[in-house]
Image (cartoon, rainbow, N blue to C red):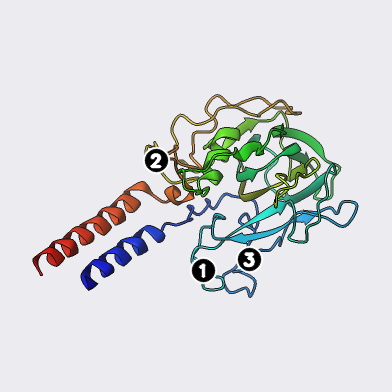
Amino acid sequence: MPNLVWSVLLTAVIFLLYGFEYDTLPDDNLIKNPWFHGENPSDSDYCQDTQKFWEKNTVSGGGSWGGSEKTQDPTDINCVVGGKTWTGHAIRWADQGSDTFYPNQDAKFWQVVGPVSDSEKQLNFHFLMVFHRMSHFRAQISGSSSGSGPWNVVWTPIDTAWTQTCGANGCNDCDGNGNRDCLWDDVTNRELGPFALSTTIATGYAYYKVEFLGNYPNPDNSATGDVGGKIARVYFSVGDPPPGSVGGEGPGGNGGVDGNTDGGISGGSDSGTSSEDAGTDGILPAPSTDGGCACYVADSNDQSTMQLLGWFFMAVLLRRCSRS
């Protein structure tokens, strides 16, 4: 029996190594702190949720986008917090744990990037998200010749609302056992697509403002109020992104081929045009056949190998147990 116990533990460890890991974003990403943790591993706050490099407004009553630090949040590094492995980070607009909500108000957070070459007219963008009910959610890109503006809106990749019960997340779990770890992939794939969105604008700018707006309705009587949501892993670049470097190839994935060619979602004030060959660099894998979850963004070959090794060791040890 001890061998059986060790076998089960070994297999569990191998699977947990990929618990909530996402591929690191490519070097062309202009966003600083896209994961909402510290920028440098030597920073004292690296393993704590932080909005460093991001700016945000404060709504009436004092609410603003805040941090989230949970094992089900995505991350690209094994940042152990409080003894928990693969604790990820996100920025959230919702109840901040004080039983206080701030409904029907526009909460924004943003980052200004640049300078970049104003001759580049292709913009590339993506992020991860989960959302309950929202009256209004928008991601918007503005350009300027100065880092302080004035700002000209050039692209609105998503401008939408989810007012139905359970919002964008939906009311069902992933496996019938209460597991909802798949939501980061499922919601992002459904609402934004698994590939980096791209558009070609009429005029390039030296600076860009990447801004998110959230506004949720009155909460219900549930613990979460069924309102608000979270964002993580923000990607923005100009020019042609490095081929195949935006995301890993998950189960059933194709290395970023046949991506989303839409220059924007749900209308918006996009002043550019969709690029015919845009969106060919994967930022999430294709949905897996077993429901999918954040754990499937690591390279599928590496993951499959590790899982097969886990099953192999389990089979060997079970065989030894049966002989003893």
Please state if 208 lies on the left or on the right of 189 as rendered.
right
State if disc 2 and disc 3 touch (CB < 8 Å). no
In the picture, residue 14 is in which quadrant? bottom left
State if disc 1 and disc 3 touch (CB < 8 Å). no
Q: Secondary structure at mark 3?
A: loop
Residue lying furthest front: 221
Please state if 274 lies on the left or on the right of 225 as rendered.
left
Residue at the image point whose x is 32% and y is 48% from the top: 301
Question: Which residue is identified by label 3?
Answer: 38
Question: Which residue is identified by label 1?
Answer: 84
Q: Earlier in the sequence, mark 3 or mark 2?
A: 3
In the picture, residue 159 is in which quadrant? top right
Along the line of sight, the residue nearer the viewer: 294 or 226: 226
- Closer to viewer: mark 3 or mark 2: 2
Task: Provide residue 33's location: percent of width, then percent of height.
Answer: 64, 58
Q: From mark 3 to mark 1, how far is it between C-alphas? A: 18 Å
How many other residues sit within 10 Å of disc 2, few (<14), some (14-19) or many (≥20)? few
Question: Which residue is identified by label 2?
Answer: 290
Residue lying furthest right: 60
Residue 38 to residue 126: above or below: below
Along the line of sight, the residue nearer the viewer: 124 or 259: 259
Q: Is residue 124 visible?
A: no
Task: Provide residue 104's location: percent of width, then percent of height.
Answer: 84, 41
